[in-house]
Amino acid sequence: MTDNTAVAGSNTAPGDASTASTTPATAADTPGERRLPKITVVGAGNVGATTGLLLVLRELADVVLIDIAEGVARGKALDIMQMRSNERFGPRISGTGSYADTANSDIVVVTAGIPRRPGMTREELLEINSGIVRSVLNGALEASPNALYVFVTNPLDVMCNLAWEIASSSPAALPPARLMGMGGVLDTARFIHAIAEATGAEPAEIEALVVGAHGEAMVPLAQRARVGGRPLNELLSAEQIKSVVDATVNGGAAVVELLQTGSAFYAPASSIVQMVTELLQPTGKILSVCARLNGEYGISDVSICVPVRLGKNGVEEVVELELAPAELSQLRASAEATKQQLGRL
Ligand code: APR
């Protein structure tokens, strides 16, 4: 069981974040005083800045945004701090271009990367974002060797595996539990949205999970999904369930198509915050997170999105749910596909 009272790297009790609104706390408070956790968000683009905004609005942590475009990080942080006059949240957010300012973070969220541009091959994108993840990890690990690391940069599973390889071979080796990726929480949010639209139910009534690689090989667990405790196939036809699954898999592409430039960021940022909340104030909730596997689900030596429980040590437990045989083989195929992509790096 996870420890329900622990808060990663902090002595703030769960539900205690409200103290921040009366006592403006900063990560630099004198030792021994209560302080908020410190979270660094690398990449102050759409996903990173929205994550920073949600984290301070929810009073979860003091936030440092860091970007190679230092002015963007500082400008967005300043804009959010000016919002503080109206919204009256306690935590502070700052922007920087230097890892020294991120020192001793409790959590580092990595959203730095570039999107695929017209004419760019998938391999070229992989090469560029791999280079970014490599340089980010070098800087961040030196400044925050004890932090929990949440990767978001796409292609997510490949980046997570690469980060694992770098982190496990660096002098300040990072235990696998402290390195995870955000993909499955977002896919699950999209699955729940699609089920809600198809059934007319509220998201709160829906229990569902998506596992596997964050991309076309994802595995929405339709056979396990419940609406008000009832299996999905009691409410929807096989054809309707297929449409729900398709809408889930194409959830990100649908946003890209409408936006024309850029990709989704509200649901991704909210999914990061779901993970961060569980890391800081664990409730034992099962989330689909990209985690290192060692034989669970019959899969080894790869990081992929599976049901886990998060806590102050990161991935506290990989939860082995009983999957339908077809869904289990899809998950294994998804892991295999990720391994093959890695082999091409
Ligand atoms: N160090 C720090 N920041 C960097 C670096 C780097 N080495 N390289 C790029 N960045 C910054 C860019 O300057 C930019 O501000 O990363 C930010 C990325 O922001 P956006 O282009 O707005 O991308 P966003 O939509 O936020 O997506 C970020 O998350 O969901 C994934 O697929 C998405 O991989 C992408 C990532």
Image (spheres, grey):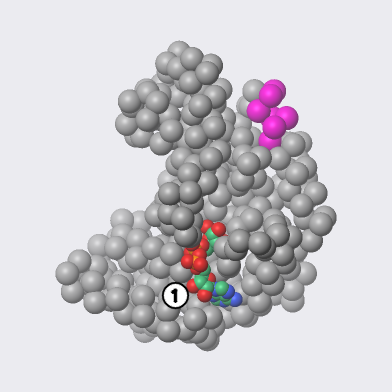
Left or right position of 140 against 81: right
Left or right position of 221 against 39: right
Q: Position of residue 305 (x, y in %)?
A: 62, 45
Mark 1: which amino acid?
Answer: Leu
Q: Position of residue 117 (x, y in %)?
A: 60, 63
Q: Is residue 277 above or below residue 216?
A: below
Quarter assignment of residue 273? bottom left
Q: Which residues are magenta?
A: 325-331
Q: Residue drawn at (75%, 63%), measured in percent from left and top?
A: 165
**Residue 31 seen in the current view:** no
Given the current orientation, which residue lies at the most extreme front position?
119
Q: Is residue 71 above or below residue 337?
A: below
Q: Position of residue 176 (x, y in %)?
A: 68, 58
Q: Residue drawn at (42%, 84%), measured in percent from left and top?
A: 71
The main secondary structure of the magenta stretch is: helix
Q: Is residue 99 magenta?
A: no
Q: Is residue 326 magenta?
A: yes
Tag 1 residue = 65
Q: The C terminus is located in which quarter?
A: bottom right
Quarter assignment of residue 328? top right
Q: Is mark 1 within 8 Å of ligand 1?
A: no
Q: Residue drawn at (61%, 61%), measured in percent from left and top?
A: 118
Q: Is residue 117 above or below residue 328?
A: below
